[in-house]
């Protein structure tokens, strides 16, 4: 599963830069699939937070602000996927995840370094995204089975942009 996520991430950059309609279609087919998975379970691999969730978080966190506009992956936003959007907010609202996030820095990095697709290096001001908005992941029925796993992940420490040994900014 992690390999599928990492392959999707690297494929996103390779294929989107070539403006491949097929690549965009595949990307959104995968998002549709993960939307369905997250309708059935709290995390990508079941009832526990895993490395796959950390990798997916980094991609989803950047998607609406960077990939949607800069890479023209604009069929839908993550906001348009109820399960992915609530999953993203759920992860973001954990202190260890939130401590690694700086969306303005991420946007500046992408929009100013990719001069072949953004030659004027214009960094958009928006979109305005409220990652602190209440999510529905705690209220779901399947959540009862994962309460013990969730309790452990709320206390994960973040230091210098690292989450349990993973630098979320590198994804």
Image: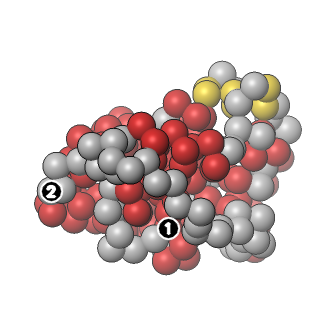
Q: Position of residue 153 (x, y in %)?
A: 76, 41
Q: Quick one: which residue is furthest to the front in this view? A: 120
Q: How is the image coloured?
A: secondary structure
- Given residues 141 and 82, the one toward you in this image is 82
Q: Position of residue 8 (x, y in %)?
A: 32, 45
Would residue 164 appear left or right of 62 to someone viewing this image?
right
Give the residue at x 79% y 26%: 159
Q: Position of residue 28 (x, y in %)?
A: 31, 65
Res 162 quadrant in image: top right
Would residue 62 appear left or right of 121 to someone viewing this image?
right
- Inter-mark Cα distance, 1 to 2: 20 Å
Is residue 135 visible in the rendered structure shown here? Answer: yes
Q: State whether residue 118 is above or below residue 136.
A: above
- Residue located beneath label 2 in the image: 20
- Given residues 21 and 50, the one toward you in this image is 21
Res 114 quadrant in image: top left
Give the residue at x 70% y 30%: 161
- Given residues 130 and 128, the one toward you in this image is 128
Q: Residues within 10 Å of mark 2 (few under 14, many from 20)?
A: few
Give the residue at x 57% y 53%: 61
- Residue located beneath label 1 in the image: 78
Task: Return the mark for residue 153.
Answer: none
Judged from the image, the secondary structure of the residue bearing numbered disc 1 is helix
Q: Residues within 10 Å of mark 1 (few under 14, many from 20)?
A: many
- Given residues 16 and 34, the one toward you in this image is 16
Judged from the image, the secondary structure of the residue bearing numbered disc 2 is loop
Would residue 68 appear left or right of 11 to someone viewing this image?
right
Q: Position of residue 104 (x, y in %)?
A: 64, 49
């Amino acid at each position: 599963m992690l390999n599928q996520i990492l392959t999707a991430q690297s494929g996103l950059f390779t294929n989107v830069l070539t403006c491949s309609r097929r690549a965009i279609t595949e990307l959104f087919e995968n998002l549709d699939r993960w939307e369905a998975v997250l309708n059935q379970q709290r995390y990508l691999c079941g009832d526990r937070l895993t490395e796959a969730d950390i990798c997916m978080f980094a991609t989803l966190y950047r998607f609406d602000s960077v990939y949607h506009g800069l890479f023209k992956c604009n069929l839908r936003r993550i906001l348009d996927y109820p399960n992915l959007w609530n999953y993203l907010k759920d992860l973001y609202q954990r202190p260890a995840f939130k401590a690694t996030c700086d969306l303005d820095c991420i946007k500046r990095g992408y929009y100013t370094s990719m001069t072949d697709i953004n030659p004027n290096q214009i960094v958009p001001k928006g979109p305005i995204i409220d990652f602190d908005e209440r999510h529905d992941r705690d209220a779901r029925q399947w959540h009862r089975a994962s309460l013990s796993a969730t309790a452990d992940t709320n206390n994960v420490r973040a230091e210098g942009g690292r989450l349990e040994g993973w630098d979320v900014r590198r994804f």
